[in-house]
Image: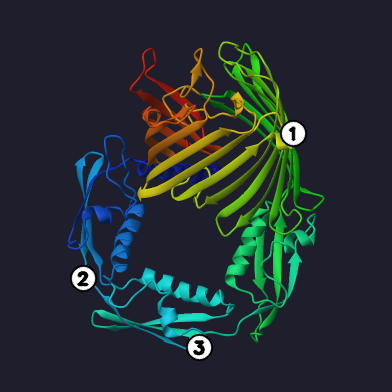
Amino acid sequence: MPRIVNILCISALVVLVFAQVALAKKGSKSNIYVNEINISGNAHYSNDALKQTMFTKESHWWKKQKFMPALFEDDLRSIIAYYNNRGYLDASIRGWDSTYVEPKRIDLKIVVSEGAQYHVGNITFSGNKVFPDPRLHSHLDIKENDPFSFLKLSRSNWNLVNMYANAGYLDAEVDPRITTNHVRIDIQFNIVEGKPIYADTVIVEGLEKTKPYVVRRELKIEKNELVTHSRIVQSQQNLYKTGLFNSVYINPARDSVKAQNRPVTVKVVESKAGEFNAGVGYGSKEHLRLSAELLQGNFLGTGQRIGSRVRFNIFDTKLGIQNIKLEGLYTAPHFIFGGVRLDNSTYYQRDVEVNYTLYRLGSELTIGKDIFRHSRIYSTTKIENNSFSKIDTASVLDTTDSRIRSISLNLIRDTRDNLFNPSHGSYVKLSGLVAGAIFKGTDEFYRATFDYMRYIPYRSGVTFATNLSLGALFEIGNTQSIPIYERFYAGGDRTIRGFGERQVGPMRAGQPVGGNYRLIFRNELRFKVYKQFHTAIFVDVGNVWNNITFSKLQQYRIGVGFGFRYTTPVGVARLDFGFKVRRKSGEKIGKIHLTLGQAF
């Protein structure tokens, strides 16, 4: 009996403890929202500037902001760091308080003490023999007479270490010492240079399927050559670009006696070479889109890629599959000699347009090479046989079967920070193509195109994007009319929004037939709203013409509107509402565009 009583008492005690914990948790989840944040004592920096450093934000009608004490404590430290990095080393938070203005809404009051601003005094160096003082000064972020900043001091220290590392002095050490003299701070960088390091040998570890020469050809480090930080980084980037490795680690061996000649170890972890990818999508142009591909990314351990791809578009479930493309792929990253890449695609394609159906059977061979840091030059040779069916003879007059034999030369410079959703950088492409009877084709023409995109970050979360696209087609030889599928078109989610696909430019019997000249100018202002959610406003201007005159250049079409973007794991989902400016008689007011990917 006493044992039962003891058990019951212990059980009751456990229940009470868990009940108190549950109540504590329930109380901790009570929602307290921030109404206003008021900061005082700040004479040199505005409230808005200080609030930008804080994660705690004020509530608005469109969004409530919870008050989280732990996060707010970090915000107070962020305010101090903001002052410290601008020379106010004595800055502090004199106090803070919260006041309930409603049962679940509080005002926050923060009082800061700025103190005096410290400036940089003399900057000196010791121990440097390889580089003179003026050369070292040029690599500093922190300058004499500037407000003192620990952040800039740290960056300057890193710049000096990196400067020595890029000269082969990987063991160099830089130790900054500061001395305070009233409100001025003198800095002395004490440098231990060491000796330059050379590769005694290069050892590759971790290979299972990949042949060693595939790794070595990507390295910028050779036996008996100087080992620099930039060469190590470039070698790592080259190996990652192959897509063959999940991780790459390159490091000269540690040496207690600081020998100049050391073995360099390249440790890699291979990625899976085989891939099967399948996708489902929807767009206002393609409607339901299905795709699948099978790839072998490291054929026989040589780094070559082979594979196949199939893509379907279903416009109408009653009609079934409309567009189809079957493709065989081959890539040799190093063709003939280093750095020259070869890509080959052999394909069968059916394109269903409103006024004809086109069947393509062809092959494209591209040879290219990276030049400089952000540029690439490549040439594409195409052999393609085409035939038509389901022709609307009222609109399409020149639909004889054809053989296209062409060669193109292309130059690209790409400095975008992100290929799929850029926020800064630019993209330029200049291209020229010649198709003619000299290659035993049926059509002779020349095409020149120019594309320019620029992305300018205006402020946090705001990006201005602009795109200019120019194109011209010229008949040569005996060709009287360029094939309808080789002409320029405009209208749709990738050119001028607010218009239907291919609905801008020359028409015949109410159907698009394309033109020989194209000018598209697009501008977009993108705003980050919350996490992956963005909005945008845009203006698209342009047209397509059969021939160019001054009066025709004034006949451009304009689409304006707004849109929403959401970043998903497979890309940016985009919904745009475009509206026509200066509508023609009978035209609809605009068009809704839904697709994956930014407009440009």
- Name the residue located 65 percent from the left edge and 87 percent from the top edge: 257
Q: Residue at x 51, y 12 (%)?
A: 509
- Read off the residue under disc 2: 115
Measured as percent of width and height from the top left, residue 337 is found at 74, 58
Where the N terminus falls, by quadrant? top right
Residue farthest to the right?
300
Give the amino acid at mark 1. Answer: Lys
Nearer to the camera, 190 or 523: 523
Of the numbered discs 3 and 2, the one sitting upstream in the chain is 2
Q: Secondary structure at mark 2?
A: loop
Q: What residue sits 70% from the left and 51% below the top?
A: 341
Q: Which residue is mark 1?
A: 440
Q: CA distance from mark 1 to mark 3?
A: 67 Å
> Tag 2: residue type?
Gly
Callout 1 environment at 10 Å: few (<14), some (14 to 19), or many (20+)? some
Report the residue marked by disc 3. Answer: 129
When the figure is inspected, residue 518 is found, relative to residue 221, above or below; the finding is: above
Q: Earlier in the sequence, mark 2 or mark 1?
A: 2
Looking at the image, is mark 1 or mark 3 nearer the viewer?
1
Q: Position of residue 346 (x, y in %)?
A: 74, 35
- Percent x, y for residue 214? 75, 58
Where residue 233 appears, as percent x and y from the top left, is 60, 65
Q: Quadrant of residue 217?
A: bottom right
Q: Is label 3 or label 2 in front?
A: 3
Please name the amino acid that badge 3 sits on: Lys
Marks 3/2: CA distance? 40 Å
